[in-house]
Amino acid sequence: MDYQLVEEEAIEHKNEYFEVRINPDDARPQRVFFVSNEENLEDVARDILQKYAPEAEHWTLIPHRKH
């Protein structure tokens, strides 16, 4: 999988980035930001989860695009 993790402070410099929100119903969900050229972003998100949050029960993928 081709992706690069991005620190939350650096996302303002990206034209397009994606967020994996882990356990999104929690009061303070874990958030992982990344950029990728991959077409199947769900697979990229699963790869990130396997590496950084294998215990995650629920997650959602959120695209962010600057207008």
Image (spheres, helix red, strand yellow):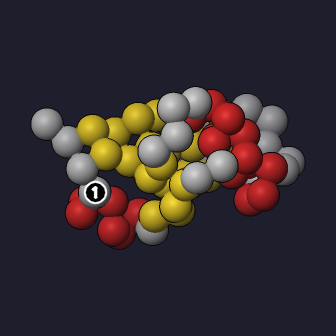
Q: Quick check: 64 left or right of 66?
A: right
Tell me, yes or no, if residue 27 can be seen here: no
Three-letter code for the amino acid on which mark 1 is drawn: Lys
Residue 6, placed above or below residue 38: below
Residue at the (78%, 58%) spot, across then down: 51
The percent coordinates of residue 60 (x first, y second) are 59, 31
Question: Residue reaching furthest right?
Answer: 55
Residue 40, placed above or below residue 52: above
Q: How many marks?
A: 1
Residue at the (86%, 48%) spot, across then down: 55
Number of other residues with Cα within 10 Å of mark 1, as a class: few under 14, some 14 to 19, many 20 or more: few
The percent coordinates of residue 4 (x first, y second) are 52, 61
Secondary element type, mark 1: loop
Q: Which image quarter: residue 23?
A: top right
* 27 or 2, nearer to the observer: 2
Q: Quadrant of the C terminus?
A: top left
Tell me, yes or no, if residue 50 can be seen here: yes
Residue at the (53%, 62%) spot, across then down: 5
The percent coordinates of residue 13 (x first, y second) are 24, 63
The percent coordinates of residue 53 (x first, y second) are 77, 53
Q: Which image quarter: residue 22?
A: top right
Q: Quick check: 21 left or right of 64?
A: right
Q: Which image quarter: residue 32?
A: bottom right
- The residue pinned by badge 1 equals 14
